[in-house]
Image: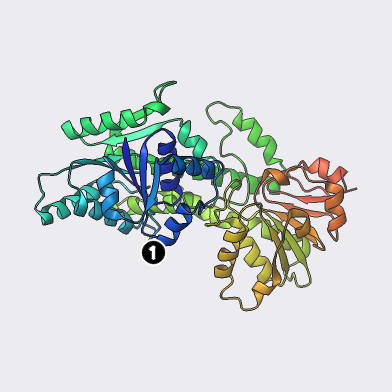
Amino acid sequence: MNITVIGTGYVGLVTGACLAELGNKVFCLDVDRNKIEILNSGGVPIYEPGLKEIIARNRASGRLIFSTDVAASVAHGEVQFIAVGTPPDEDGSADLQYVVAAARNIGRHMERNCIVVDKSTVPVGTGEKVKAAIRAELEARGRGELDAMIVSNPEFLKEGAAVEDFMRPDRIVIGVEEGAAGAEAREVMRELYAPLNRNHERILYMDVKSAEFTKYAANAMLATRISFMNELANLADRLGVDIEHVRKGIGSDPRIGFSFLYAGTGYGGSCFPKDVQALARTASEHGQELEILGSVESVNDKQKQVLLKKIVARLGEDLSGKTFAVWGLAFKPNTDDMRAAPSRVIVRELLQRGAKVQVYDPVAMEEARHAFALDLADLPGKEADLHYAGGAMEALEGADAVVIVTEWKSFKSPDFAAVKAALKEPLVFDGRNLFEPVTMARLGVEYHAIGRPSKRPK
């Protein structure tokens, strides 16, 4: 099948590459010439395990094309995926300008009926706006006999496991219009996803609005679980309870399960923060306040300060003369995504309090440089106190403590003898609960985690 994917951001690039891997001929469009040049020269602008190899393989086979040519992209695809960004507007609502612009471009250039798939995360009712934008352009051209069939096919890709999630989905949500047009679109989408649907039926068919709502509801539920566990962890700190024991106790109940029950420094990334805000804004526009979601967001904002509060409680408000190693900068492992990452809050606060900071992340160092340059623009001179280490052990050299913010696998079993030798004193602030407090005390390490009793070495 000939497929066009509009947008080569995270969702678009993974979608386009994986559809090409399934044997389709995919045309990936982006208006960012620099990004297209990177992709055509063999580079990949994001880090995602396995993605670079899939792109290289399918570019070489001719099944994957990257271009800025809008007219050619519309001419190519019998199915047009819109996978552009929907960043939060000033009021928290999703900004649909890029989605609508993509729809207008389709309407300006289409010469046959086609299926237009909203892959971007969009509010309820966006499908109608996309159809109206295309219809307006067709009417302006005098081509009102043409039609675009609208489908909502939200993505459920976890950063760091996106290729696996696409190729082995737990569900494929497809929202179609009513009537003959919807039936035709449903059949085409069934054929497109047939290679992923052979083991058992994974496709959930519904109306367009329900599909749009499903994506927001899923992310809001997951964000709620994270904030709920973080609140319990903060209470556990006061009660002397180990939140890890609690997590195992409640997670073993099949009605609850273990996913997204890990206490930590709060969620970040491009999805949960903006989707929680957008859903709350949608509710407000329709006269309903989502009180739980308001609390979810508030708890998450506060949680990014919890690790810092533990540092201040142990070492004081004035951290002048102190040096901290920070392990992990991306908002989660197996990605270089720094959007809304807790590390950005922690590093800024440490620097503001007079500390020097030595940071390391296995893949996000370049993205971190850009992020911290923005974060510290209003703090003249502070960037000089931020050092980008070449490795985890280098970051520890001469530090008063290590602060663990992202749970990369390479951090989970370090040489603690070497860690102790590199640090001025064996002091660990663990925002991801990677280690057992009793074990750390036995090793002679003072250990502070999230919702776990602190253990000082005997």
Q: Residue at x 31, y 55 (%)?
A: 69
Q: Position of residue 431 (x, y in %)?
A: 67, 50
Q: Which of these two is toward me, 272 or 399?
A: 399
Q: Along the horizontal axis of the image, is 199 left or right of 400?
A: left
Q: Quadrant of the N terminus?
A: top left
In the orientation shown, which residue stands out farthest toward the right?
458
Say few, some or many: other residues with alpha carbon within 10 Å of mark 1 (under 14 / 14 to 19 / 20 or more).
few
Is 345 or 356 nearer to us in this picture?
Answer: 356
Q: Residue furthest bottom?
A: 380
Q: Position of residue 373 (x, y in %)?
A: 58, 69
Position of residue 6 relative to residue 346, above or below, is: above
Kindly state the secondary structure of the residue where label 1 is placed.
Answer: loop
Answer with the quarter of the image where residue 228 lies.
Answer: top right
Left or right: residue 378 versus residue 168 is right
Q: Which residue is mark 1?
A: 90
Horizontal side of residue 206 vs 446, given as left or right: left
Above or below: residue 26 compared with residue 350: above
